[in-house]
Image (spheres, helix red, strand yellow):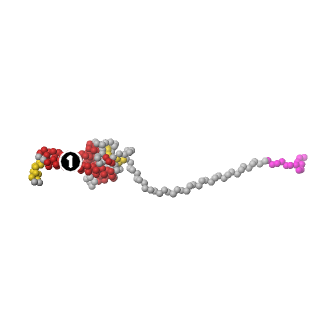
Amino acid sequence: MSMEPPEGSPSPSPETSAPTPPPQAAPPPPPTPPPAAAPAAVGWERPETSAGPAPGVEFAPHGARLVAYIFDGIIIGIMVSVIAIIGAIVIALGSTYEGNRVVSVSAPAAFIGSIILFVSVLAGILYFPYFWSHGGRTLGMRPFNLRVVRDSDGGPIGWGTAFLRLIGLWVAGLVFYLGYIWIFIDKRRRGWQDLIAGTVMIKQ
């Protein structure tokens, strides 16, 4: 016999449902990238200085090198001329004249005058080797802080290398001065005189 609930009695309530979670907020939009900057105007830039053989040392600039040689040429010219004039005066004072013609020259005057003239020539030859082998710089190079050193290790040069460089200086001017122009071609700015003697000119 079935048992039915009496009519009008409340029916059992359905199972209580879980609470609904609140809606999640939408993620913020990604930041807008800034507008691309306009390319900067390209201005004049100083060319890079060529690297020297050591820190704080650079190869001798072409202009300073040329001006130094001009100064040295003037100094040599004045020095040789003054000494030669002194020798000529000594010979003239010991000479005997008839009118405008020299008749004879005394032996002492001729000897002393000849020595002085020889000294003038010797001074012109020894000018560069002396200064190159004593500090590496001539009188014309000093205002520009130029110096001649060994290309192998940057050390000072001696008399032998200095004379070899002088010979190279003469050779450099024989073929249309091509040996001097070579400093514009060589990466270490060496002329033929430097290649012959194994030297390099630096600014320090």
* Magenta stretch in the rendered image: 1-15
The answer to whether residue 199 is seen in the rendering is no
Residue 110 among those drawn in magenta: no
User: Could you say which quadrant of the image residue 44 lies in?
Assistant: bottom left
Tell me if residue 150 comes above or below residue 32 in the rendering: above
Estimate the x, y position of residue 137 in percent, counting from the top left.
30, 45
Tell me if residue 159 comes above or below residue 36 in the rendering: above
Residue under the point 33% across and 52% down: 63
| Residue lying farthest to the right in this orientation | 1
Q: How many marks?
A: 1
What secondary structure is the magenta-colored segment mainly? loop
Amino acid type, mark 1: Ile
Estimate the x, y position of residue 18 in percent, counting from the top left.
75, 48
Label 1 packing within 10 angstroms: few (<14), some (14-19), many (20+): some
Which residue is the site of mark 1?
Answer: 83
Estimate the x, y position of residue 69 in percent, counting from the top left.
29, 50
Residue 5 among those drawn in magenta: yes
Front-most of residues 15 and 173: 173
Placement of the C terminus among the 4 image quadrants:
top left
Front-most of residues 25 and 144: 144
The answer to whether residue 123 is seen in the rendering is yes
Front-most of residues 194 and 66: 66
Q: Is residue 120 left or right of residue 43?
A: left
Under circle 1, the secondary element is: helix
Residue under the point 37% across and 45% down: 57
Estimate the x, y position of residue 96 in percent, counting from the top left.
10, 49
Residue under the point 11% across and 54% down: 100
